[in-house]
Image (cartoon, helix red, strand yellow):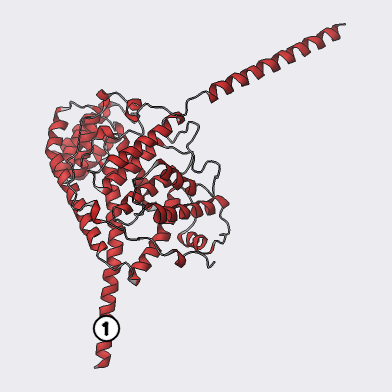
Amino acid sequence: MNNCKSEKIVCVFSISFTLAFACLIILASVLYFKQPLYCTNKIHNDLSDESEKPKYELKPYVPKFSQDEVKIVPNFLPDYNEIEPCEELIRIEDVPKIWSIKTKNEGTEQEALTAVNMALKMKNSHKLDKARKLFQHALALQPHHPDVLNHYGEFLEEKERDIIKADHLYVRALTVSPRHTRALSNRQRTLPVVNELDDQELERIDAKRTNLMQLNNKDPAQKRVRKELYFQHIYHTVAIEGNTMTLGEARQVVETRMAVAGKSIMEHNEILGLESALKFVNKSLVNKGTYITVYDILEIHKRVLGFVDPLEAGTFRKTQVFVGEHSPPPASHVPSLVQDLVEWLQSETQLHPVKKAALAHYKLVYIHPFVDGNGRTARLLMNLILMQAGFPPIIIHKQDRAFYYNTLQLANEGDIRPFVRFIAQCTESTLDVFLYASEYSRKALESRRDQNDIIAL
């Protein structure tokens, strides 16, 4: 009798638990699928109040060339039959912050200020090496303390003549304390100088671009450079994301489609996907004559991730993701935010192409619209903007990975200019490679002719 009762109790309890669990699943499903796909809130309203945004702006850049001059953009990538298998007004408050500043202090404020006072004494005693180390120690203890940032900036400006880094430290100090009197005074002094230096760099890049446009695109030296840089671009772009293929192995995969022993299928597919996306950008988007659209960005990503994860390729993420300390916007906001980015790209005509490309890269990284492949897609979008303006696609080398991410982090903290300068340096380096190849080829030909003349005599 007792056994019968206990069996009934167990049976009732099991049925009740099963029904309760089923109800919870149904309720969770209803709530999940009821989330709106699109959201009209703007990115800047979601991030922070206006009072928290620094009120700095940069001097506008006056372009030295018109976009109308570039009727047909030269092809900076190699002919594919050589590769295939034989069959200026930037407002810092307009740039969204990826990560909020999370103070990570390694020491107390008193310890940091003591180190600063000792550094100032060393500075006055002309012991600059010790002063620099003490300032760096104070900055490690309190990386966001405005007094530490300001004093270190003054040291760099006065003793080491590093105006750009000093100005950046003043900006960081004002980001934390917008009414810091000395930092405001210092930045009013350094800002015109830094703007002039930035403009000079962009003018130098424009001059090199003009020289490159005048070269013969069918010159054998240019063909060799285009082919070599094509493999370099694929190799370094995937290597930044952790791909362990060497340059030779990446080239083997692209040229022969043969597997490399000891490497994963995913690493092979990452290389094939990036090559497919690069071809798509070069063949379909560079000279299409219309604005970049959301569809174009999705098509780029579809090829980047198509071999690795076909289900996620070319689609916005549907879940929340986290990247280190970065918490991207909710998945329901992604379509509207990407649309905002595209509208900005279509309406922004005053920025220098290098600045515009760098900001487009930064904004897409902030939105993080995909589950995977965001960095590769952002770099391809950046190169698309540069190529449409007559610049060759730039390469961010894997050796510069730490510096690349560090400049993004500096942008997150309120100063986008270090990242823009980094992209400008990469652009100039790529231009130098093309120009040097042409100059080297010319000198080699002249030397060969001189040797022939001597033999003839």
Q: Position of residue 259 (x, y in %)?
A: 57, 59
Q: Residue type at mark 1?
A: Arg
Q: Position of residue 18 (x, y in %)?
A: 70, 17
Judging from the image, what secondary structure is the residue with disc 1 in? helix
Query: Observer-nearest residue: 401 or 432?
Result: 432
**Does residue 209 sit above or below 307 in this rendering?**
below
Number of other residues with Cα within 10 Å of mark 1, as a class: few under 14, some 14 to 19, many 20 or more:
few
Q: Residue at the spot x=49%, y=24% of the render?
A: 35
Q: Residue at the spot x=52%, y=23% of the render?
A: 34
51 displayed left or right of 339: left
Residue 148: quadrant of the picture = top left
Q: How many marks?
A: 1
Query: Observer-nearest residue: 71 or 362?
Result: 71
Quadrant where the C terminus sits is: bottom left
**Does residue 400 sit above or below 367 in this rendering?**
below
Residue 74: quadrant of the picture = bottom left
Quadrant where the N terminus sits is: top right
Residue at the outermost top position: 1
Q: Which residue is mark 1?
A: 449
**Does residue 75 sit above or below 56 in this rendering?**
below
Query: Observer-nearest residue: 217 or 181?
Result: 217
Q: Residue at the spot x=48%, y=49% of the render?
A: 303
Q: Position of residue 337 (x, y in %)?
A: 38, 33
**Does residue 13 sit above or below 44 in this rendering?**
above
